[in-house]
Amino acid sequence: MQGILYEEASIWHFLFVTGLLGGGAAWMTGKAVAQTWGTYVRLFLYMLGLGIGVRFIHHALFDGTMFSLHYYIVDTIVLMIFGFLGYQYTRTNQMVTQYNWLYERASLLSWKPKG
């Protein structure tokens, strides 16, 4: 997988920076966008910017390539997964708590009308 998903010598560097640091920031960004009733488009734009930040951390800490389109896309896709999950989880909680007379939780990431 080295060379396809990550360029560092160890997968642990990729998991730490992109998964833990970037994924945590992406989750919190998704949560913040959902709490302010933002849209998916706004979250998408924020994830593009966060992807640049994660590339910089790879470059600064582990001497990764800063301006690599391939690794930027890989990092940004991972961040978008975390960000959109955080968004949907928070939006579900909003809908079932603020509109509890209309909706009930269908799953961890979805709601349905009360029937």
Image (spheres, grey):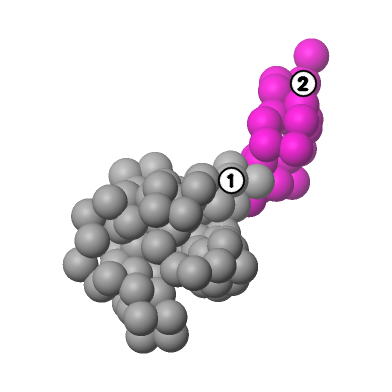
Q: Is residue 111 above or below residue 69?
A: above
Instruction: Between label 1 and label 2, give the one nearer the viewer.
Output: 1
Judging from the image, what secondary structure is the residue with disc 1 in?
A: helix
Residue 3, placed above or below residue 20: above
Q: Let me know if residue 37 is in the magenta part.
A: no
Q: Indicate the quadrant containing the C terminus: top left, top right, bottom left or bottom right.
A: top right
Q: Residue at position x 70%, y 23% from top?
A: 112
Question: Residue 84, image x and y in percent?
Answer: 51, 46
In the drawing, what numbered circle is on residue 19?
Answer: none
Residue drawn 28% across the image and 51% down it = 70
Amino acid type, mark 1: Leu
Q: Nearer the viewer, residue 85 or 74?
A: 74
Q: Position of residue 45 (x, y in %)?
A: 29, 54
Q: Left or right: where does residue 101 sit relative to residue 71?
A: right
- Where are the magenta residues, as a range? 90-115
> Label 2 sits on what residue type?
Lys
Q: Is residue 28 above or below residue 81?
A: below
Residue 13: quarter of image: bottom right
Q: Position of residue 75 (x, y in %)?
A: 41, 56
Dot 2 lies on which element?
A: loop
Q: Which residue is mark 2?
A: 114
* 50 left or right of 70 in image: right
Q: Which residue is mark 1?
A: 85
| Residue drawn at 40 percent across, 75 percent down | 58
- Which residue occupies 34% across, 74% down? 64
User: Horizontally, is 98 left or right of 8 in the view?
Assistant: right
Q: Is residue 104 above or below residue 115?
A: below
Is 69 or 3 nearer to us in this picture? 3
What is the count of numbered marks?
A: 2
